[in-house]
Amino acid sequence: MVIILFGPPGCGKGTHAQLLAKRWGFLIIATGDIFRFEVAKGTEFGERIKGYLARGELVSDELVLEVIRDRLSQNEKKGVIFDGFPRTLNQALGLDKLLKELRRELDMVFLFEISDEEVIHRLTTRRVCRNCGEIYNLESKPPKSPGRCDICGGELYQREDDKEETIKRRLAIYQKEAAEVIPFYEKRGLVHRVFGEKEAVQRSLNEVIAARSREWPSI
Ligand code: AMP
């Protein structure tokens, strides 16, 4: 099974991807996480992309598709969730081509609906563990001891691109690209809209996936 989680920054894609992976055993391919890891490691690739991440701009489609090709071909059998990919129509077309080569099919696109105000609020209060990547929110999911990860004790930090000005730029970029990507998948009847509180969203995701896996038991 191949699933895309599509939505603005801060809509909860990462959190839901983790919950779904735990329940169904999916492999998560989260381009943002992959890129941040490369930047943190200081690799040559990381050096090439770090300016884009800091400014909240998109990394080039060619580089993104290279990373996806690499990850997908290492895991030809397993069910996959894409978190944060594709972001542009070009990436969506590239993914189609790649899936065809690998004889796989896209099953569904979940579209997360959330207001701009909520995105800004959620992201300015988001904190991430520098060590294990666990995601916190100062209001809805605060750590037990301030600034420290509950799981590994690592330091919590605010992503550089979670500052208000950068969030607004990321939202504007999202809206421009989404205007092309959403109709592209809607025409094929692949889009499922999800909204509301975390529990309601997770329930909807699971229901759609369960219905699909009854049709196609081997995810
Ligand atoms: P995210 O964690 O998904 O919010 O991504 C963080 C940053 O990584 C984005 O603001 C972009 O700079 C870059 N990025 C992540 N995924 C993509 C993608 N599919 N295409 C282009 N840039 C991306």
Image (cartoon, helix red, strand yellow):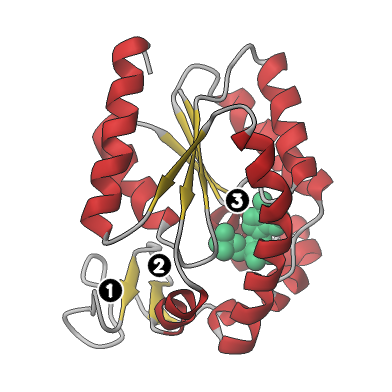
Q: Identify the residue at image location x=71%, y=67%.
A: 173
Choose the circle earlier in sequence order: 1 or 2.
2
Left or right: 26 as drawn, with respect to 178: left
Hey, what amino acid is under mark 2?
Asn
| Near-viewer residue (190 or 52) | 190
Left or right: 128 as drawn, with respect to 88: left
Q: CA distance from mark 2 to mark 3?
A: 18 Å
Residue 93 seen by the camera: yes
Label 2 belongs to which residue? 131
Label 2 CB less than 8 angstroms from ligand 1 = no
Q: Nearer the viewer, mark 2 or mark 3?
A: 3
User: Which residue sits furthest left?
Assistant: 144
Q: Identify the residue at image location x=66%, y=63%.
A: 175
Q: CA distance from mark 1 to mark 3?
A: 23 Å
Circle 2: is it few (<14), some (14-19), or many (20+) Cα within 10 Å? few
Give the quarter of the figure containing the N terminus. Answer: top left
Label 1 belongs to which residue? 149
Please, is residue 162 above or below residue 182 in the view? below
Label 3 CB less than 8 angstroms from ligand 1 = yes
Q: Residue 69 location, x and y as percent?
A: 70, 32
Hey, what amino acid is under mark 1?
Cys
Circle 1: is it few (<14), some (14-19), or many (20+) Cα within 10 Å? many
Q: Quadrant of residue 139?
A: bottom left
Q: Quadrant of residue 78?
A: top left
Label 3 belongs to which residue? 31
Q: Identify the residue at image location x=67%, y=51%.
A: 87
Give the quarter of the figure containing the C terminus. Answer: top left
Residue 36 seen by the camera: no
Please, is residue 174 above or below residue 86 in the view? below
**Tag 1–tag 2 contact (CB < 8 Å):** yes
Q: Nearer the viewer, mark 1 or mark 3?
A: 3
Q: CA distance from mark 1 to mark 2?
A: 9 Å
